[in-house]
Image: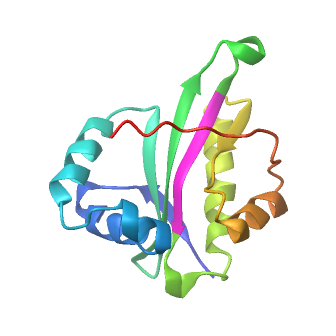
Amino acid sequence: MSVTFRDARARDLSVIVALLADDGLGRDREKPQSPELYSLAFGRMEGDVNNRVIVAEQDGRIVGCFQITFIQGLSRAGARRALVEGVRTSSEKRDQGIGEAMMRHAVELARDAGCALVQLTSDKSRTRAHDFYVRLGFEQSHEGFKLDLK
């Protein structure tokens, strides 16, 4: 399995949105019929060295994606951290090591950016994802909270 990684480009958005919408939670949350919303968000992120969307390619085709944001903090003696979100692997490519390769790449990017830790959240219903992250060395050390503002 050969997977390569690169920063996403605007022309990748339709594939990325399809990946984000490709499960029960995503089908309810994402709005692929409104590509202008994603284009606007991506435009705001472009050029921000602290906010990247990465795609995984195999044989020239996008098979996965994730977003990584680098955050400067005061806690932990001013530690920088990486927040990983929107981790998705194409449904027909799951269980082939692509997700693991993406997460290892995310950790490498975080190290290269001088981060002291990598953090992520995962919906409580995604128990398979939780097992996956634990297998990769992530600890379920915190409870997360969200407030929907819409």
Number of marks in picture: 0
Give coordinates of residue 27: x percent, y percent: 39, 70
What residue is shown at x 35% (from left), y 71% (from top)? Answer: 18
Q: Is residue 117 above or below residue 134?
A: above
The outermost residue toward the bottom is 92
What residue is shown at x 15% (from left), y 53% (from top)? Answer: 36
Instruction: Name the image quarter holding the N terminus.
Output: bottom right
Q: Considering the whole magenta stretch, tell me its main secondary structure.
A: strand
Colour setup of the view: rainbow
What residue is shown at x 62% (from left), y 73% (from top)? Answer: 98
Asked if residue 45 is among those painted magenta in the image, a careful observer would answer: no
Q: Is residue 71 left or right of residue 134?
A: left
Q: Which quarter of the figure has residue 62?
A: bottom left
Asked if residue 82 is among those painted magenta in the image, a careful observer would answer: yes
Q: Nearer the viewer, residue 2 or 110?
A: 110
Instruction: Name the image quarter holding the C terminus.
Output: top left
Give coordinates of residue 112: x percent, y percent: 64, 37
Q: Is residue 88 left or right of residue 74?
A: left
What residue is shown at x 83% (from left), y 63% (from top)? Answer: 135
Q: Is residue 4 left or right of residue 48?
A: right
Q: Is residue 19 above or below residue 5?
A: below
Q: Is residue 78 left or right of residue 59?
A: right
Q: Is residue 143 above or below residue 131?
A: above
**Magenta part of the protein: which range?**
81-88
Give coordinates of residue 134: x percent, y percent: 82, 58
Give coordinates of residue 58: x percent, y percent: 49, 78
